[in-house]
């Protein structure tokens, strides 16, 4: 079963391809997403990587958390489910 990881501290120039390639050192990457601000079209500095197994996800956390990537120090941990938010006007 695939395991989703939160990746914080990304450089604003990080692409989904570069993120996928970097995390592939820990195993099979199912998906890599860099979160983009809707208004500016610029990266928000975080994203998500989905690893194919629990073991590969744990290896990615151990390997990349606190490591430098593209000039920034990464925070890598298990992604938490999105909490329901109230509608804002």
Image (cartoon, rainbow, N blue to C red):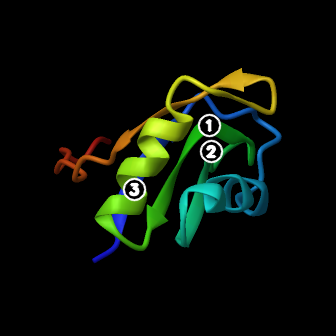
Q: Position of residue 83 (x, y in %)?
A: 18, 48
Contact flag, marks 2 and 1 (Cβ < 8 Å): yes
Tell me, for residue 37, which label it has, or none. 2
Tell me, for residue 57, which label it has, or none. 3
Contact flag, marks 3 and 1 (Cβ < 8 Å): no
Residues under labels 3 and 2: Cα distance? 26 Å
Tell me, for residue 44, which label it has, or none. 1
Closest to the camera, between mark 3 and mark 2, is 3
Question: Could you tell whether 38 is left or right of 15 in the image?
Answer: left
Q: Is 49 rendered above or below residue 53?
A: above
Tell me the SS state at disc 2.
loop
Q: Nearer the viewer, residue 42 or 48?
A: 48
Question: Could you tell whether 57 is left or right of 80 in the image?
Answer: right
Q: Is 32 rendered above or below residue 22?
A: below
Closest to the camera, between mark 2 and mark 1, is 1
Sequence-wise first label, 2 or 1? 2
How many numbered marks does the figure carry? 3
Sequence-wise first label, 3 or 2? 2
Location of residue 64 (image quadrant): top right
Which quadrant: the C terminus?
top left
Closest to the camera, between mark 3 and mark 1, is 3
* Label 1 crowd (10 A; few <14 / some 14-19 / many >=20): some
- Tell me which residue sits at (62%, 26%) in the image: 67
Residues under labels 3 and 1: Cα distance? 23 Å
* Label 2 crowd (10 A; few <14 / some 14-19 / many >=20): few
Residues under labels 2 and 1: Cα distance? 6 Å
Q: Position of residue 40 (x, y in %)?
A: 73, 41
- Tell me which residue sits at (58%, 60%) in the image: 33
- Tell me which residue sits at (27%, 77%) in the image: 1
């Amino acid at each position: 079963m695939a395991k989703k990881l939160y990746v914080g501290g990304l450089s604003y120039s990080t692409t989904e391809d570069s993120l996928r390639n970097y995390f592939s050192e820990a195993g099979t990457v199912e998906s890599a997403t860099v979160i983009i601000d809707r208004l500016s079209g610029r990266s928000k500095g975080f994203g998500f990587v989905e690893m194919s197994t629990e073991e590969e996800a744990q290896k990615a956390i151990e390997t990349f958390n606190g490591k430098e990537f593209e000039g920034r120090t990464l925070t890598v941990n298990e992604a938490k489910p999105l909490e329901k938010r109230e509608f804002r006007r």
